[in-house]
């Protein structure tokens, strides 16, 4: 398990309060949970998966950072 997977798993207990997902915005927040440090993007974390959503201009960089 990578450091980022551990960080994502650490926030998942929040979902037990009845939320279906957590939407992260902002470079610092997304960078903390994914390692992707760009000004554009969103990160959606569900109980089973995490999604990194980026502008097409950052697709290649996001693919290199997001593993799994």
Image (cartoon, rainbow, N blue to C red):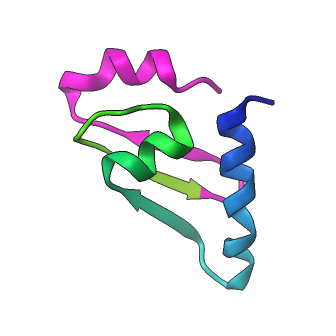
8 vs 59: above or below: below
Coordinates of residue 59 in the picture (x, y in percent): 31, 22
Left or right: 12 in relation to 61: right
- State the residue at coordinates (51%, 44%): 32
Q: Give residue 10's quadrant in the image.
A: bottom right
Coordinates of residue 17 in the picture (x, y in percent): 70, 84
User: Quick check: can you spot residue 42?
Assistant: no
Confirm whether the magenta stretch covers residue 61: yes
User: Quick check: can you spot residue 33?
Assistant: yes
Coordinates of residue 61 in the picture (x, y in percent): 35, 18
- State the residue at coordinates (60%, 79%): 19
Farthest residue, direction left: 57
Q: How many marks?
A: 0
Left or right: 21 in relation to 47: left
16 vs 57: above or below: below
Q: Give residue 4's quadrant in the image.
A: top right
Quadrant of the snapshot with the C terminus:
top right
Coordinates of residue 34 in the picture (x, y in percent): 52, 37
Farthest residue, direction bottom: 17
67 vs 44: above or below: above
- State the residue at coordinates (26%, 24%): 58
Quadrant of the snapshot with the N terminus:
top right
Magenta residues span 46-68
Confirm whether the magenta stretch covers residue 6: no
Left or right: 33 in relation to 8: left
- State the residue at coordinates (47%, 15%): 64
């Amino acid at each position: 398990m990578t450091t980022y997977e551990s960080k994502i798993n650490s926030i998942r207990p929040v979902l037990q309060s009845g939320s279906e997902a957590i939407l992260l915005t902002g470079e610092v927040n997304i960078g903390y949970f994914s390692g992707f440090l760009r000004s554009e993007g969103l990160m959606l974390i569900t109980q089973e998966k995490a999604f990194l959503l980026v502008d097409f201009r950052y697709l290649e960089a996001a693919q290199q950072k997001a593993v799994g």
